[in-house]
Image (spheres, rainbow, N blue to C red):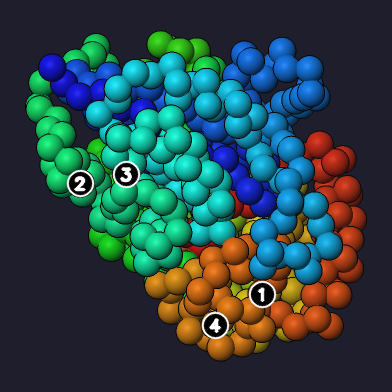
Amino acid sequence: MQPSFILINPWIFDFAAYDLWSKPLGLLYIAGYLRRRGCRVHLIDCLDVHHPQMKTHSDVNHLKRRLYGTGKFWREVVAKPPPLQDIPRPYSRYGLLPEIVEQELKSVSSPSAILVTSLMTYWYPGVREAIRLAKDIHPDVPVILGGIYARLCREHALMRSGADRVVSGQGFESLSAALHEYGIHVSAKSGDAQPTEYPAFDLLTKIDYVCIMTSSGCPFHCQYCASHFLYPEFSRREPGEVLEEIVYWHRGSAVQDFAFYDDALLVAQEHHAGPLLEGLARLDLDLRFHTPNALHVREITGEIARLMRRTGFRTIRLGLETSNMPLHRELDNKVAPGDFEKAMHHLRRAGFGPRDIGAYILIGLPGQSVDSILESIQFVGAQGAVPYLAEYSPIPHTALWKKAVACSGRDLLSEPLFHNNTLLSCWDMPQKKELPRLKRMVSEIRERYRNGKAQGARHKVQGSRR
Ligand code: SF4
């Protein structure tokens, strides 16, 4: 008999969190992989916004959902961990009530192993809590932790997560090796009717949208980004195969909204995004696409902009980061003078308006001046796009990490909670005091262009530029 597994997407503990096409894609891939081999898989998504028991719970308010499947998570204010006591903002656990997760765990008898994923390094309290609960209920079952926190902060995860095993490699091979250590073997037998190993979105209570990854990694080496550490190789799927997956979810599950999780969707587009979008255009389906991870500014050509318009791109986010060109040369070399203006020209000609286009501006980098951010905000506004401030999160294994550690007044090395972008850990107090003014400027531009109805902030993922 094939083994059975509980897979857990833990809670978020943070000052703010929002469901902007946020799904545990890696975990859903693992679920699909295991199920295809005949394993029994029970997914516990602590961030499930449609869980039937939450809806009937008297203590919980109605949850607002917004455009394109996005919206709020369930939320309960909790005590701040001691290192964050000085932050004058409420801290919350986002997701299901713990008693509901407990019931879910109890509903599975004798799983072979419990697999837990992780995302932002500073969300480890949610990971630890999920593992603690899992071990309370299934004390003899090995708990294996993977995901971004596990990979970026391996030593911390080994010491503090409570997991029996921390997987810090990539792909199913690392997981298989960890399972072997516990005598758990997943054979190659095919178990379900899915045509290929798609992520198991059908295990979610409801599919609001599907997240698509057409490539992994990125050919750029921006100093603030961990993409290169997490995905050392830049690899891409066949456009035809991606097209089939999109059609599979649309025709089989009536999904209309798709969020690209790529770090470099448009790079080398003539062999990749170009053929994919041409294929989509030929099928003429009623779809909407979103790019929360940002597109490379210099890859927006007239042709790709037309295809994006034709195929239903609705949320376009550009990775501008700053309008300060010397800073670009120092940090990422991905935007040259005139690139942003050209990209905006192509997008406007294709029919996109300011309501559709947002540009991310990094804020809080070590040594970055407030004035350079003011200029970037004005620049983006003048170009007809909406600026989105993306607070810098210091990330281990990035080129900027040492500088971040050196300039921060907080102990970034031993406490991942200080990586939280809300803290602006690499800025001093006078700089942080300018934040409301910067946010006001952004709001004014957003008001002007978007009538306050558009989708918001940058997708919070430490894997890439965010
Ligand atoms: S920030 Fe973007 S462009 Fe730079 S390395 Fe990361 S994913 Fe690539």
Report which residue position mark 3 lands on: 144
Question: Are circles 2 and 3 on residues that touch, CB within 8 Å?
Answer: yes
Question: Are circles 1 and 3 on residues that touch, CB within 8 Å?
Answer: no
- Mark 1 vs mark 4, CA separation in Å: 9 Å
The amino acid marked with disc number 1 is Ser
The amino acid marked with disc number 2 is Ala
Say which of 130 and 43 sits in front: 130
Q: Which mark is residue 425?
A: 1
Report which residue position mark 2 lands on: 178
- Mark 4 vs mark 2, CA separation in Å: 32 Å
Report which residue position mark 4 lands on: 405
The amino acid marked with disc number 3 is Ile
Identify the element where label 2 is drawn. helix
Q: Earlier in the sequence, mark 3 or mark 4?
A: 3
Visible in this render: residue 34? Answer: yes
Q: Mark 1 near ligand 1 (CB under 8 Å)?
A: no
Vertical position of residue 274 compared to residue 44: above or below: below
- Mark 1 vs mark 3, CA separation in Å: 31 Å
Image location of residue 347, percent across then percent down: 61, 48
The residue mark sitting in front, 1 or 2, is 2
Q: In the figure, is residue 74 to the left or right of 171?
A: right
Question: What residue is drawn where x is 37% and y is 31%?
Answer: 138
Image location of residue 67, percent across then percent down: 70, 28
Vertical position of residue 219 compared to residue 187: above or below: below
